[in-house]
Image (tube, rainbow, N blue to C red):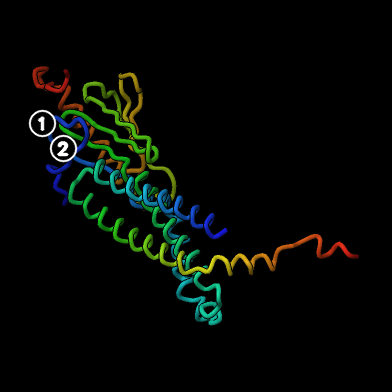
Amino acid sequence: MRDLSTVRFPGKHEEETVIAVYHRHWFDILTHLFLSVFFSVILIGGFAVLPGLFPGIMSSPNAPFFLFLENSFLLFLWLTLFLIWIDVYFDVWIVTDERIVNIEQKDLFNRRVSELRYHTVQDVTSEVQGVVPSILGFGDVLVQTAGESPRFIFHNIPDPVAVKDQIMKLAERRRHAPQTNERSAT
Amino acid sequence: MTEIIRLFYLILFIGVSAVGLYVCYHILRYSLSRKSAIAAVILFASVFLLFLLANALSFFQVDWDGLLRTAEGFTYVPSQYSSF
């Protein structure tokens, strides 16, 4: 179980309590990483199998050049793997007792942070589309708000129905709470 | 020619190192948990440094002049075939 008290994010208030943190489902992350993983397996398989099939490769005068090429591919694959992982895993939705914060990593140099207060929530919908999402239980949660950005979307998160219920409960609680409790309104 | 190849490699090496450093910075700066950030950076940096070092070593083991001479042997030179 993750210790949520250690979670830190830009703009976190001192008394704010993090209730849940959602990342994309592992399968969604894996689909983004698929090509890098596929080429890594081929390359590493090539390292293991080719010298056995063609013993002349390693004794050829150009062997260091081939090793250099293979190593360069591995280096770029490792970098690409982490760049994609950063792009996908760093998309995060943080549910606190005051608000929902969405940190969206568009690419390495493009990051967007948006937040949603519970009193603006009008409607919450969960959506699971496709065979794999239905089997593995992941999908989107769409939060309809009265604010400037009308929709707040949690993309491909695990168990979207439970998340929808949780947001509805928090929004209800906030709606029925006395106005003085709205400490984050300023 | 070897000097040009070395110069290109130096530029590439600096570029790749800079991207690697930026990945480390990004993980440390934006990760939600300090513990997992450190673990991810250790994993990334150790493998990355290993590959980078192996890459530099294998680059300097290549006989670029010999390789270029071999490549020239395969190059199509029109003057060789212009007699007929």
Report the residue at 34% width, 63% height from top.
B50
**Location of mark 1 (residue):** A14
Front in this rendered view, residue A112 or A101:
A112
Q: Using a 10 Å C-alpha cutoff, classify the residue at mark 1 as few (fewer than 14 neighbours), some (14 to 19) or many (20 or more).
A: few
Mark toward the viewer: 2 or 1 = 1
Which secondary structure lies at badge 2? strand
Question: Does residue A134 appear anywhere in the picture?
Answer: no
Residue A28 image position (x, y, % from top left): 38, 49
* Quarter location, residue A114: top left
Judging from the image, mark 1 belongs to the subunit labelled A
Residue B22 image position (x, y, % from top left): 33, 45
Query: In whole angstroms, how far apart are the C-alphas of marks 2 and 1?
Result: 11 Å
Report the residue at 22% width, 25% height from top.
A118
**Location of mark 2 (residue):** A18
Residue A145 image position (x, y, % from top left): 31, 23
* Residue A7 drawn above or below residue A50: above
Residue type, numbered disc 2: Val
Q: Is residue A31 left or right of residue A2?
A: right
* Residue B21 drawn above or below residue B70: above
Judging from the image, mark 2 belongs to the subunit labelled A
Extreme residue in the right direction:
B84
Question: Does residue A98 appear anywhere in the picture?
Answer: yes
* Quarter location, residue A172: top left
Residue A85 image position (x, y, % from top left): 36, 49
* Quarter location, residue A150: top left
Which secondary structure lies at badge 1? loop
Front in this rendered view, residue A156 or B2:
B2
Residue type, numbered disc 1: Glu
Front in this rendered view, residue B80 or A116:
B80
